[in-house]
Structure formats: structure tokens, C-alpha cells
Amino acid sequence: MGRYPTIEPYDHGMLDVGDGNHIYWETSGNPDGKPAVVLHGGPGSRTSPNLRRYFDPAAYRIVLLDQRGAGRSVPPAGDHTTDMSVNTTAHLMADLERLRAHLGIERWLVWGVSWGSALGLRYAQTHPGVVSELVLTGVTTGSDPEVELLTRGLGRLFPEGHERFLAGLPADERDGNLAAAYNRLLESPDPDVRERAARSWTDWETAMIPAPPGSVARFQDPVFRLGFARTVTHYWGNGHFLGEGNDEGVILRDAHLLKGIPGTLVQGSLDPGNLLGIVWRLHHAWPDSELVVVDEAGHDAGAAGDDALVAATDTYARRGTGPGPA
């Protein structure tokens, strides 16, 4: 099956979302098609033209955006003077609502990858009436145990890389919240300290989650590397700003709020996050979801995952937008 051919946007812009932030957005496909919004990973990554290709351009009005501080949105997180206190999950969800209103969209399908899946889930739990379906891959829920697994637990599987990762921190910062410790370095007034911390963080990212060459290459860009590391550690070090109870998993706890919203979860069987059983627990707590496990695939579910994601959006294209959940 594969993804749809490459297409170009028919419209784009910068939306003022307050706090001095402007987010980049674009629309492609059919202006009269079923609306779908795409949420990129990270936090702090950026959108990609390839993400348009998961949708039939004749059937969908495809909305892509760069989240606060990421990609073409301004101000960039890579600028040390950018205020990160106004970059939280609540702010990102409010941005989605502003963008939806700006584009005149009543309801839209929400497609998310990695961090984008957690953001999409929380957005649907908070604004269920505006989400027609969810299509998620590389699923995470942003819980504290997931962060602990990725920053410390996987050190048992990748001991050499984790030793280097810990060595990037002062000795008295290696026993607590590692993401928060790295974030303190990334907020240092010393640019050399920030650069070393960003490189050490992204080296660990690529050591623990093998990624396609294109994903690794972006970390060679010092501007992207710094903004990405700063944003990820800002979120991971603060419980993804999901509030009290994230030590057990706020999104899993509130899975009942997804009732009535159909969803498809596409997950590689070798995704490290599966060690906690998150995606299986989410699927069983959300009866309206379908789980597609791709054998011998990791966080990037590969070609078979692409097929499953396209099959999902093709199926949902036939549903229309319909009324929201009760």
C-alpha cells in the first residue's frame, strides 16, 4: 500500500497564540475534505512534509503545525532567551483550539506520533467534542514511569551509552530526576555548558531508540539540537505538565474520557516503551480503540506501520466528521 504521493500545501501562515508566540501552520489536500491535524513528536521536534502522505489528499484537509518553540514557530526554544514557562501541555492544547477556530474547523481527526500521541490523547480527553478520531503511533502517555524508563531503566540495555549519559551530569545530580538535571544545564547562562548538555542528551536519545538516518542527522544541526534537548528536558523534567497523579499515569487514569472516540494505535513490537505495557493498558482501558502491533519494528514502526496508518486514515475518511462523543 505505502503512503500517498508527495503534495504541497495550498495555504500556510503564522498564528499569534499569545505569550509572544507565533506558531507555523499549513494546510494541504482537499480544502473541502475531512479535517485532520498532525501532531509531531519530541516534545520539540518539528513537522515534516512526509507526514502529509499518511492521508488521501482527495479526502482530507490536512493541517500540519510546528508546536511552540519548534520548527518554524517563533520564538525558537534554541534561543536561550525564549521563555519556556509558557510552553506547557496546557499551552499546546490551547494553541490547537486557537488554530482550529482560526481555520473554521468544527471537528478534526487527530494524528500523533510519539510525544504527539500523548498530546493528542490529552487533547481528546480535555476537548472530546472536537475530536472525531485518533490515529497514533509510537504511542506514549508521558507518565513519570515512562520517563524513568527512558532516562534510567534502559541503561541496563545500553550500559555504555548510559554511562556517557550520566557522565554529562555533575556527580551529585546523577541519582534524581535526570531530565530535570539536564534541563538545569541547558538553562545555564554559559553557552558551552548548554552545547555540551545538548550533545550528551541527543547522543543518549539515539543510543536508546534506534532511528532512521534522517532522524539522527537532524541532531547534527546545533540549533535544532539545542532547542530539541531544551524542550524535551523541560517537559520530561516536569511530568509533561500533566498534573498530580502522573506518577501513576494521568492519561491512562483518564482513559474513560475517550469513550465514543474511535482510535487506532500502531505500535512496533520492539518499541522500548512497550516494556511498561503502556499501549496495551491504554487499548484495554479504551474500548473504542484498535491496536495494531507491527512485529520486529521499534519506535518507528517502519513500512508495515506506514501501511497500517494509511489504512486507518482511509477507513476514517469514510466516516465523515459526525457528532462528538456523548
Image (cartoon, rainbow, N blue to C red):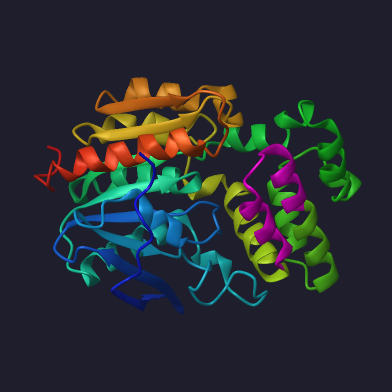
The one of 149 and 246 positioned closer to us in this rendering: 149
Q: Magenta stretch: dominant SS?
A: helix
Indicate whether 326 appears above or below 180: above
Residue 189's x, y, as percent?
78, 73
Q: Quadrant of residue 231?
A: bottom right
Q: Residue at x 57, y 73 (%)?
A: 76
Q: Residue at x 58, y 26 (%)?
A: 270
Q: Residue at x 48, y 66 (%)?
A: 68
Indicate whether 189 appears above or below 308: below
- Find the magenta span and give its range: 201-221
Residue 173's x, y, as percent?
82, 46
Q: Residue at x 14, y 42 (%)?
A: 318
Q: Is residue 137 left or right of residue 8?
A: right
Q: Quadrant of residue 58?
A: bottom left
Indicate whether 311 appears above or below 31: above
Residue 36's x, y, as percent?
27, 54
